[in-house]
Amino acid sequence: MRIQFYDSTKFSSFYVLLAFVFVCNNNSHLLLFLCPPRLSLSLSLSLSFSLSLSQILVSSVLESALAIWSLRMDAKSAVDLMESSSEVHFSGFHMDGFEQRKASIEQPTTSETDMYNQPFVIGVAGGAASGKTSVCDMIIQQLHDQRVVLVNQDSFYNNLSEEELTRVHDYNFDHPDAFDTEQLLLVMDKLKCGEAVDIPKYDFKSYKSDVLRRVNPSDVIILEGILVFHDPRVRELMNMKIFVDTDADVRLARRIRRDTAEKGRDIGAVLDQYSKFVKPAFDDFILPTKKYADIIIPRGGDNHVAIDLIVQHIRTKLGQHDLCKIYPNLYVIQSTFQIRGMHTLIRDAQTTKHDFVFYSDRLIRLVVEHGLGHLPFTEKQVVTPTGSVYTGVDFCKRLCGVSVIRSGESMENALRACCKGIKIGKILIHREGDNGQQLIYEKVPNDISDRHVLLLDPILGTGNSAVQAISLLIRKGVPESNIIFLNLISAPKGVHVVCKSFPRIKIVTSEIEIGLNEDFRVIPGMGEFGDRYFGTDDDDEQVVVPAQ
C-alpha cells in the first residue's frame, strides 16, 4: 500500500477522510484518519489481496470520502486527480454517480460564499520615511503563524518616459498622479478573490518596472504607501486603516539616509526634492488622509505597545467569520455544541412543531440576551446583604422592541421574558417576489425616537424587508446607532445589503448561512420560519392587516 501527499490549495477549506486496510494475522483491519485543512492528498493504492469484505468496506469508505471531494470540486477535477496516480484505483468506482449525487444536493446559485471568503486587508499610510515599512515588518513577524503578503504602493509608480527621464529631478513622485492606481486596484481585487498576481518591482535608478514578482493569496494583505488612503476606491478595500505619524525632522533625516544609500542620490538633490515636492505633497495630499485612519501610531516602529494591540486585534478578526472581518457592526454569538445541536433540530424537516417551537425559543432567548449586551450601561454601586459594596452596571431604561410581522412575532416572548413590561411595536411588509416589498402596516411607540430599538426578524435573507423596516424607524426619528437587529440566521447577501446601507446599526445573529438559491430562499436555512413556528400552511397564508 502506498499513500502519496501533495501540497495543494484545492482542498484547503475542509477535512478529508482517509481510509486504508491492512492485514495482520489473517485479519483485515480498517483504519480511518481525518486529515486537517490545507492538506490535500492523492491516493494511490495497490491491493494485493482478493476481493473480500474488507476490500468492499474500504471501497465504500473511499467512495464516501471522494463524494465529499466531488462536492467541493467538479467531477473532471476529481477524475484528473485520480488519473494522476500511477497505481491501481478503487475497484468498481465511477465518477458518474458523483455528478448525479452532486446535482441532487441543492447548491446556492449566488456567489456570496466566494464574495465574502476574503482576506483581512490592512492599509498603512503616512509620510515618506515615517516608519511604515518597519510597522509592517513588525506586524508580519508577530503574525508568523498566518499567511501575510505585503503590497507596496511604490511598486505601482508610472514608468517615466524618455522626456521625463531628462528632467527626473523635476518629477513629483509624491503626487497622486505619479501612481498607476488602476493597476493597483486590479491587483488588490485579484488578491481578495484568492488569485495569484504578478506585481511590478519599481527600480528607482532606472525609473522603470521591468521586473515582476509573483504574489500568492494570503490570509492577511498589508497595503503600504504614502497615498493609499487618498483614493476612496482603495480605501474601500481595507478592513483596517493605520496612519504612522512621525515628526517631520525625523522623517527628513531618515529620507536623507535612505535615498543616499538605496537610491544613489546626493544629499543636495534629496534636500531640494524635499522642499520642492515632498513637504508640499505631505501637507496637501498625505496629512489630510489622516482623518480616515482607524488607528494612528505615533513614532512608527518604536511604538511596540501600539503594534502589539494591533496584532491582537488582527488575531481576533482572523478568528471570526469572514463577514465579521468586513463589518465590525455584525456580531455572531459564539457557537457551541449546544447551539449547533439546537440548530440541527430546528433545521431538520422532520422535526415536530412542538420541538421546533421549543428549540427555536431557546435559541431566540440566547440571541436576545446577546443583543441586550450591546445596549449602553451606566456604572452602579449596590450594598450586598453582607454589607459589602458591589460595583456593577445599571440597565438601559429607554428600550422597545419592533417585530416584523409575522415571523418576528415569534421573538416577542423571549424579549418580554428578558425585559419586563417592554413596549413592542409591529411592522408588516407584504412580500411580492424578491424586489416587490410593500409596507402596509406599522404601529410603534410614539416616543420611539427617544428609545433604543431591538428590531426582531428571525431570518435575514435578501435584506430588502430589513432595509425597509430600518428606513421606517429612521424616518420615525430613531438614530441609526440606536437600532439593534436580532435574527437567528443571516444570509451573506442580506448582511451586505443592511450593513452597507446602515453602517452604524448592529446585527446580532446566531449563524451565517451559505447563501441564497434561485428562489431567494436561504440555504441551507430552515424553511418558512413563520409557517413552522405558528403551524400554518404556506398555501393557506393570507395577509391580514391588524386593526388600527
Image (cartoon, rainbow, N blue to C red):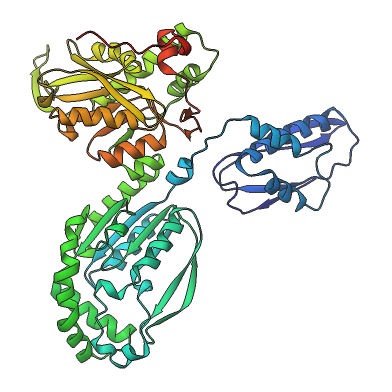
In the picture, the quarter occupied by the N terminus is top right
Residue at image position (25%, 40%) is 503
Residue 66 appears in which quarter of the rendering?
top right
In screen coordinates, is 531 left or right of 6?
Answer: left
- Residue lying at the far right of the rendered structure: 50
Residue at image position (39%, 63%) is 150
Residue at image position (74%, 34%) is 97
Q: Nearer the viewer, residue 18 or 403?
A: 403
- Residue 443 horizontal/vertical position (percent): 19, 16
Q: Nearer the viewer, residue 499 or 19?
A: 499
Residue 131 vertical placement versus 445 (above, below): below
In the picture, the quarter occupied by the C terminus is top left
Residue 390 appears in which quarter of the rendering?
top left
Residue at image position (34%, 15%) is 406
Residue 460 appears in which quarter of the rendering?
top left
- Residue 247 horizontal/vertical position (percent): 14, 70
- Residue 498 horizontal/vertical position (percent): 31, 36
Q: Nearer the viewer, residue 24 or 265?
A: 265
Residue 151 vertical placement versus 500 (above, below): below
